Amino acid sequence: MSTSEVEDPQSYVARIMAEIEDEVRVRRASGDLPPKLERELDELFLAHSPTVGRGGDLTEALRKLDAAVFVDPVVPVDSERAAGAYVKKGMRSLLLWYVGWITHQISQFAAATSRALHIVDGRLQELERRVEVQRVPGAGIVEVDAAHGATSWWVADAVAAVAGTGGRILHAAGGDGWLVRRIAEAGGDAYGVDPRTSLVERGALGIADLRGEELAVHLRAVAPAGLSGLVLSGVVDGMASGEREQLLALIDSGLMPGGTLVIHSLSRSAWDSPDAPLEADIAPGRPLRPQTWCHLLEQLGYQASAAVGPEGEDFVVTAVRGQIDSPETTSAR
């Protein structure tokens, strides 16, 4: 088979599974694969295989449960001894009334449990379908050349606000490291994260500390109070309320008391303009106003102030997190 005719992996697996099933049917029909041996092999596979190998979902698990619901009271009587089969057959006949009653109760319970689980499975599938239809996608990175670059009007003030905080400073979305380099030149210990790996790889060639990952994923891995400064640009503009609340909670965990948070965002007028980025059309949310950001951050214990850009198309919010009162201060109050 040539390189251009390489078989799709899923098609290859499906073809191999079909060949195995055909071989099993042939051996089962010829008597080479007794039902008892098949059940034993299936039980061994279920006992030792990972969940994914068994189907990995509730529907497949229920299918296997349905196959095992019935408990057979008629035990096999085959024996390697000459009289063993007659003895076993006699014992089976004597105890069948009792064993049959027990197995009937067990089978009824298993069947009722299976029916209940099928109802749960059906409702879960319907719930998943409804949730999937209403699922709110995460906000993507929204950037414009005029507002997201080393010479933008807000960059100098943002660098001055975080460079002297004395700890690690994170920029997201870091892009190719344009702001990380500016902060480093000002004496700050900066690094960046960005899910756009192509930009990250390009910036890494310039010896900038960049990580190709989602901001929320990274913040979950940051040690509590592990950041002294955080700059967000192109991140919060299109966030829905739920994603924004989650981000603020993660920042609250990762930013040390006294740390500085800088948020840059496009304004609503820029968001609705004909020149707005295409990402604005598919974003789940819209930019908040500067005063709304200040209100939210002040509720979380920050001292916040906002500055609007020269053309009114973007703004920057600078917020300093309040210090946590010591036990001595609290008792003195």
Image: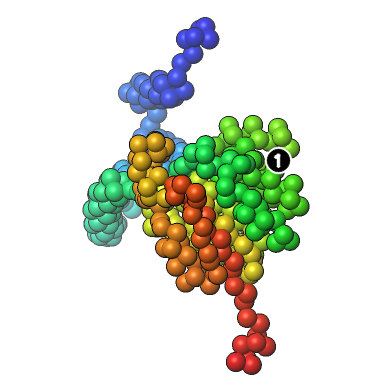
Residue 89: in sight, yes or no? no
Which residue is more in the foreground, 97 or 326? 326
State the image quarter where residue 288 is shown: bottom left
Question: As drawn, which residue projects farthest toward the bottom?
Answer: 332
- Which residue is rendered at x = 58% and y = 40% of the image? 149
- Which residue is rendered at x = 49% and y = 39% of the image? 144
Which residue is more in the foreground, 15 or 38? 15
- Residue 17 lies, in percent from the top left, at 41, 25
- Which residue is rendered at x = 47% and y = 23% of the image? 9
- Residue 181 lies, in percent from the top left, at 70, 43
The amino acid pointed to by label 1 is Ala
State the image quarter where residue 55 is shown: top left
Question: As drawn, which residue projects farthest toward the top?
Answer: 2
- Which residue is rendered at x = 45% and y = 62% of the image? 293
From the viewer's perspective, is residue 9 above or below residue 234? above
Name the colouring of the figure.
Answer: rainbow
Q: Residues within 10 Å of mark 1 (few under 14, many from 20)?
A: many
Which residue is more in the foreground, 82 or 271? 271
Residue 236: in sight, yes or no? yes
- Residue 252 lies, in percent from the top left, at 55, 65
Which residue carries the number 1 mark? Answer: 208
- Residue 189 lies, in percent from the top left, at 73, 52
> Which quarter of the rendered picture does the C terminus lie within?
bottom right
- Tally of numbered discs: 1
Q: Label 1's element?
A: loop
